[in-house]
Image: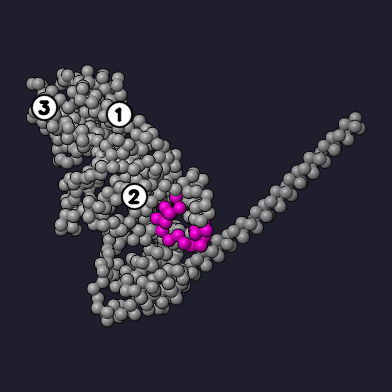
Amino acid sequence: MSEQLHDDAVNFIREAACSLINRTTMFIFIAAMKRYLIVLICFCILFNRVCGQSRKAIIDSLVKYGVMSANQRPALQKAFKYSGHASDRVAILRGLESIMIQKTFHINPRRTGIMYSYSESNLTKKNQDSVNTSLRHLLEKIKKAGLLTDRVYAYTLKGIDSGRYVAEMQLIGTLTEMSARLEWLAPDKLLPVAEDLHKNGIIADSSFTRLKNDIKNGKIESALQLNNYCKLDRVFDPSKYPDDPDVWLEQMHRDIASIVPGLNFTNFSYTTIPDTSFSIPGVRLKVSLVCNGRTYKHTSLPINTFKNKQAKISPKDIFIADFYRIFNKILTDQQSPLRLHSVMFSAGSNPGDDFHHFALIALSGEQAEIFMKEPVLSYMFVSMDSHDTTLTSAKVDSTITQWRKIGLFAHLSDEQISKAIDNAEADDLYSIDELLVNFPGVVYPLYSSFMNPRHPYVNLLNHLAQITHGAFAPTKISQRKINGTVKLQYLSKGKIHSHIFHSANGWFDPGFPAFMKNLGDENSLPGKFYQLRYSNDVIYLTKQQHDYAVNHNLLDLAQQ
């Protein structure tokens, strides 16, 4: 009995001791946490006070030096609401620019979008000297207020001395842009980009070492410079090419071909095609060349010739250079893992002059994905060019032959088919189905219904009828609104048909696929309407055409 009491006493003392220790430990932990919490709160208060005092001190200095008036303080303080991740320095400079825009144009740039530029100055030397003197005084005042780094100050002062600026607003715009850009290209932001590019084999070891040093030493002033460190990469300056298209167009293609081995070509030629897709006059360039014994073709995006009175195509008129895509056809035929991509840059990561250049880079599919994710995406991103190795020239030729065999082009003459085949061979190859748009009357793009916003369903039904080439011939087509819906009605084979759409744009309506699917059966047609998977264009196929196309993988149809 005494032993049992002894054991109970020992257990009681042990539990009491553990409880005391736990409470003591908890008390010490809470006391310590309180101390850290107090320190954290004090730090935040101090930070906000210092930050606030810093902003206030800068604004006070701007008022003191006459850069802005005291009653403009509220307008400047609003700049911090829209500053995002920008520093106070950049936020205040943007606020100053906003104030000057409002003062000059009497509008609020945050509510009304505005773009402005300055052409070459026609000031006399005396007037330019007077402007330069005024701008130097303004620059010194802004520098005294603590808004400029030595680098930005030195660059802008040199620009003033060379007569680059003609107005205060232009000067403030330069200070804002350059300050924001250099912050964006700071080492802590840019080094992770370099590391990602190196880790994925886009930058070689030696170039990576050089790039890291250049980033740390502040030598990177533009995201465009990153191309100089990448493998299989080239930057193009269109102004360096002669104006004669008979010279510059072939030379530019040879320079593009030099990026990847095995793209040498012969028999280069081109034709110009007037482009009327936009209100501004332009042309498309249709290029043909021979590589590895095969002829390749490509039709470019429209090139603006509005400024060129002689309608002469200058390399300086190029906004988006897509000439490289002819070489992706060659790389696909070679079963190369590489494709050429156009390198684009995020706004704010380049000075304005860099947008007169374009860059191309050869990447594998895995490497291209790196440019679609952070941190690289914020500085460089590449065009979405296909890495599908099955889209070869041989497959294109075979598929077009099979399309013709099943009668998709029966409504076209031999001359029309030959022209369409030539256009298809020169088209951008994203998917086989998209080549069908080159053959008139085979497919109908649904977005075209927007061309008649008042009667989109009437327009839609008329065009669906056209691609059946007489099999479907609706008449008395009408549409009207009923209690927030749209009723489409038409007469076919002596019978009135109607359908209710619950959306202003029927093809976004959940019931639209059913409408499309039933249109053939409802009107006793020999075929049905189908949507192509990737383009969403509509095609009409008889049962025989459909079965043959599906069995031989000639079309990629969306699920009905």
Numbered range of the magenta stretch: 212-230
Please name whichever residue, 265 or 366, is drawn nearer the observer in this view of the structure: 265
Dot 3 falls on a residue whose secondary structure is loop
Vertically, is 507 above or below 80?
above
Q: Which residue is mark 1?
A: 395
Q: Nearer the viewer, mark 2 or mark 1?
A: 2
Residue 482, image x and y in percent?
Answer: 17, 34
Q: Residues within 10 Å of mark 2 (few under 14, many from 20)?
A: few
The amino acid pointed to by label 1 is Lys
Which comes before the other along the chain, label 2 or label 3?
A: 2
Mark number displayed over residue 474:
3
- Residue name at image x 25 percent, y 52 percent: 247
Please name whichever residue, 172 or 517, is drawn nearer the observer in this view of the structure: 172
- Residue 298 appears in the rendering: no
Residue 128, image x and y in percent?
Answer: 28, 77
Q: Main secondary structure of the magenta part?
A: helix
The amino acid pointed to by label 2 is Asp
Mark number displayed over residue 255:
2
- Residue name at image x 26 percent, y 29 percent: 397
Please name whichever residue, 366 or 539, is drawn nearer the observer in this view of the structure: 366
Q: Nearer the viewer, mark 2 or mark 3?
A: 2
Residue 232, image x and y in percent?
Answer: 42, 47
Left or right side of 339 for 114: left
Vertically, is 126 above or below 8?
below
Does the magenta segment cover residue 229?
Answer: yes
The amino acid pointed to by label 3 is Pro
- Residue name at image x 50 percent, y 66 percent: 51
